[in-house]
Image (spheres, rainbow, N blue to C red):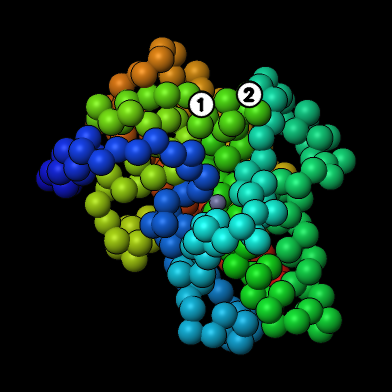
Amino acid sequence: MHFKRLRNIIVMGMLCYLPFTSGAWSLTGHRIVGEIADSYLTKKSRKAIADILGKESVAMSANWMDFIKSDPSYNYLYNWHFINLRAGLSETDIDSYLVTDTATDAYTKINFCIAQLKNRSVLSLENRQLYLRVLIHVIGDIHQPMHTGHFEDLGGNKIKVLWFSIPTNLHSVWDDKLIESQDLSYTEYATAVNYTNKQQRSEWQAEPISKWVTDSYNIAQKLYADVTMPDQKLDYKYNFNYLDIVNHQLLKAGVHLAGVLNDIFD
Ligand SMILES: [Zn+2]
């Protein structure tokens, strides 16, 4: 019956729908990634992170970067949430692009934040908080396939679709709609998808960040190909077809984030 609430949301959504350009996994999505990462932190990392974030959990700190969009002094962070790429690139194309990438994007800024946090002795507490919250958030974002989407459609923001009759766009379906439709809290969701074994985690955590980008990009290509007409209606079937990929990307993001945090803080 988990679509019952969805029907209510649809009715409410029809009454108060406002178009907007979204830019991140939903609040819940980011918290799921943070919660999963938290479960794989070493004791030493967990303590070092608590020294920086205080009583803010990894899961809750994951939303900071969306909340501060309301403050114009943080406008410079806008391009840090995603990396747009051209259509039709191969893995080799992406790898060679990323090697020389100096743009302000999710890939360069993840690397930047890691380097800053490793340099902890010279970094103020305020900056350690900033870079840690950004890192937790953007590692989540880069696993949302449409955050590695194409320039020309702004990562799917310009691709209009209907989600159970509600006008929205492909980017937003992947940010929010699929996750929110499951009607789970972030802790319930994290518990439901957080199944890995040590070998799988080691393999995933050994992957370079460029591989995360390529994997996301390759998923995005399938998503683009699957929307063939304007205002295409996406509903139960779409949810059924793609839920495993959503869950897999959330899980991988959490495991990747834990690997990065343990590398920095342990
Ligand atoms: Zn974001």
Check disc 1 and report its element: helix, strand or loop.
loop
* Residue 257 appears left or right of 120: left
Tag shown at residue 233: none
According to the image, label 2 marks what residue? Answer: 152
Residue 119, placed above or below residue 6: below
Is the residue marked by circle 2 packed among few (<14), some (14-19), or many (20+) residues within 10 Å? few
* Residue 64 appears left or right of 96: left
Q: Amino acid at mark 2?
A: Glu
Q: In which quadrant will I find the C terminus? A: bottom right
* Residue 180 appears left or right of 50: left
Q: CA distance from mark 2 to mark 1?
A: 8 Å
The image quadrant that residue 113 belongs to is bottom right
Is the residue marked by circle 1 packed among few (<14), some (14-19), or many (20+) residues within 10 Å? some
Proximity of marks 2 and 1: CB atoms separated by less than 8 Å:
yes
Provide residue 87's location: percent of width, then percent of height. Answer: 66, 22
Q: Residue at x 46, y 68 (%)?
A: 59
Q: Amino acid at mark 1?
A: Lys
Check disc 2 and report its element: helix, strand or loop.
loop
Residue 257, placed above or below residue 158: below
Q: In which quadrant will I find the N terminus? A: top left
Examine the rendering and report whether any part of residue 82 can be seen: yes
Provide residue 193's location: percent of width, then percent of height. Answer: 37, 55
Front-lying residue, 64 or 86: 64
Mark 2 vs mark 1: which is more N-terminal? 2
Front-lying residue, 107 or 19: 19
Residue 233, placed above or below residue 57: above
Provide residue 262's location: percent of width, then percent of height. Answer: 65, 72
According to the image, label 1 marks what residue? Answer: 158
Q: Residue at x 42, y 30 (%)?
A: 169
